[in-house]
Each structure stands twice: as C-alpha cells, then as structure tokens.
Image (cartoon, grey):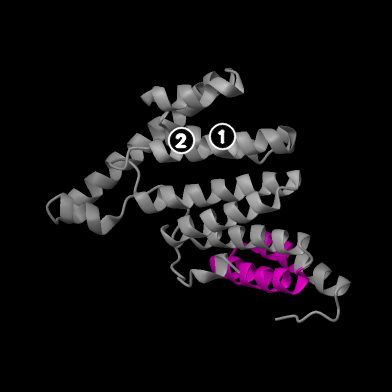
C-alpha cells in the first residue's frame, strides 16, 4: 500500500499558501511582516489564476508535439493556474486515455517550472502528487500496468514531500484502491478505501466519505471471503 506509507495526519487546507514560519523568518519575524508576505502571495496567485484560462487555451491550441516545448520555453506559461487547468482537463472523460496522459504530463512539467519563491515547494509537491495520480488513471485505462505502478510510486514520493493535506492523501488512496481492485487484490482495495474514508471523515467531506464507503461496501459484497480490515 504505497500511499499508506506516509503516516502524517496534518490537516492543511488545499490552498496555495507559503510556509508561514519561513515567511516569518524571511520578513524579519514580525506578525505584520508575515501578513504582508501572505497578502503578496495571495495577490500573485489571484493574478496567475486570472491569466490562466487564456494561457491554457493558447497552449492547447498548439499541436500536442509543440505544447511541451512552448511550455518550457515561455516563462509566461509557468503559472499555477495553468497547471490547475491542465490537470482538470486531464480528468475530463472527453480527454480519452491518451489525451489524459498527455495533459497530466504537461501539468507535471508545468509544476516543475513553477517559481519556488512564489509557490511553496510542499504545495507544489501536492500538485505533482495529484498529477501523477491523473497520469496513473490514464495508464490504467490504457492497460499499462507497469506505467501505473511507476505513477503510484511517483505520487507516493510527492505525497511524502507535500503539506500533509488529507484531501490529497484521500484521493491518492482512492486511486491506489482502484489499481489494486483492477489487479484482483480486493482485500487491499477495501483496506485502502477504509483509510481514504478516515481522511474524508476527518476533514468533514460527507460527499467523498459516502462515495468511498459505498465503493468499499460493493467490494466486500462481491468478495465476502476477503478480509474486511
């Protein structure tokens, strides 16, 4: 259970914020300095998200072969909102497995190019974990099981470097559960979903909690002899 190897239980909102303790140290140690630094980061993020739709549309108007080169070459595409939009597009059914894999890879490239002075590395690691999971989902639909396992390992590595966001962790546990169920390892899948449910219960997301509990119950009904732990 790759995602279960990270045992932190820190509840951190899934927002893009710097590490307050680092900002406090960098800005002279005063609360006023910290608040000013936080406001600067939030303003920069708002600008990036406002610019992202046009930038993403421009990037996606290119041929798939040209997109990565343009993304790497043009700093204006090194934008948090662009990464978010690429990741969201990769999860749409209309993308299809090859398209989803391509978009997830672009999101990963974009995340690698983000300026660490504007985006805290642990939050970028959360984004990368989500993008690796999206890439793995596409590979699973393509039947690329070795590629799926590579994506799982990469997602787990990014998760270990992230903020401890329980929502991200729960979603990755769900992804691994789907992989294990596809492999016929229903007992492991049920156990992973139980852990995901615990994350969603802690953050108070009733919709996600109900979904994973229903999926786990379906697995247990289909495999009554399997362990339910």
Location of residue 75 in the rendering, given as x and y in whole percent from the top left corner: 37, 25
**Position above or below: 228 against 29:** below
Location of residue 46 in the rendering, given as x and y in whole percent from the top left corner: 40, 35
User: Camera-side residue: 127 or 97?
Assistant: 97
Q: Which residue position holds label 2? A: 110
Q: Are marks 1 and 2 in contact (CB under 8 Å)?
A: yes
User: Camera-side residue: 65 or 31?
Assistant: 65
As helix, strand or loop, the secondary structure at mark 2 comes to helix
Q: CA distance from mark 1 to mark 2?
A: 9 Å
**Relative horizontal placement of residue 156, taking residue 196 as reference (left or right):** left
- Quadrant containing the C terminus in the rendered view: bottom right
Q: Which residues are magenta?
A: 185-213
**Relative horizontal placement of residue 89, taking residue 69 as reference (left or right):** right
What residue is at 78 percent from the left and 66 percent from the top?
214
As helix, strand or loop, the secondary structure at mark 1 comes to helix
How many numbered marks appear? 2
**Relative horizontal placement of residue 42, taking residue 157 as reference (left or right):** left
Query: Any mark on residue 129, and which?
Result: none
> Of circles 1 and 2, which is in front?
2
In primary-sequence order, the first of circles 1 and 2 is 1
What residue is at 67 percent from the left and 65 percent from the top?
209
Magenta segment, principal secondary structure? Answer: helix
Q: Which residue position holds label 1? A: 86
User: Camera-side residue: 75 or 22?
Assistant: 75
What residue is at 20 percent from the left and 55 percent from the top?
24
Mark 2: give few (<14), some (14-19) or many (20+) Cα within 10 Å: many
**Position above or below: 108 against 208:** above
Quarter of image, res 192: bottom right
Location of residue 157 in the rendering, given as x and y in whole percent from the top left corner: 47, 58
**Relative horizontal placement of residue 41, taking residue 219 as reference (left or right):** left
Mark 1: give few (<14), some (14-19) or many (20+) Cα within 10 Å: many
Quarter of image, res 122: bottom left
């Amino acid at each position: 259970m790759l995602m279960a190897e990270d045992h932190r239980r820190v509840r951190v909102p899934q927002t893009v914020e710097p590490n307050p303790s680092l900002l406090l140290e960098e800005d002279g140690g005063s609360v006023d300095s910290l608040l000013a630094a936080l406001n600067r980061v939030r303003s920069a993020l708002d600008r990036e998200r406002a610019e992202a739709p046009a930038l993403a549309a421009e990037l996606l108007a290119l041929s798939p072969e040209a997109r990565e080169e343009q993304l790497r070459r043009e700093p204006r595409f090194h934008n948090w909102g662009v990464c978010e939009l690429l990741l969201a597009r990769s999860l749409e059914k209309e993308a299809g497995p090859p398209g989803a894999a391509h978009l997830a890879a672009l999101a990963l490239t974009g995340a690698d190019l983000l300026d660490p002075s504007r985006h805290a590395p642990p939050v970028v690691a959360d984004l990368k974990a989500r993008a690796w999971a999206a890439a793995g989902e596409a590979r699973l639909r393509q039947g690329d099981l070795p590629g799926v396992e590579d994506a799982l390992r990469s997602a787990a590595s990014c998760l270990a470097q992230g903020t401890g966001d329980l929502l991200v962790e729960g979603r990755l546990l769900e992804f691994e559960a789907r992989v294990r169920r596809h492999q016929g390892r229903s007992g492991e899948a049920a156990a992973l979903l139980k852990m995901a449910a615990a994350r969603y219960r802690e953050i108070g997301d009733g919709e996600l909690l109900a979904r994973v509990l229903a999926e786990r119950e379906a697995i247990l009904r289909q495999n009554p002899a399997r362990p339910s732990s």
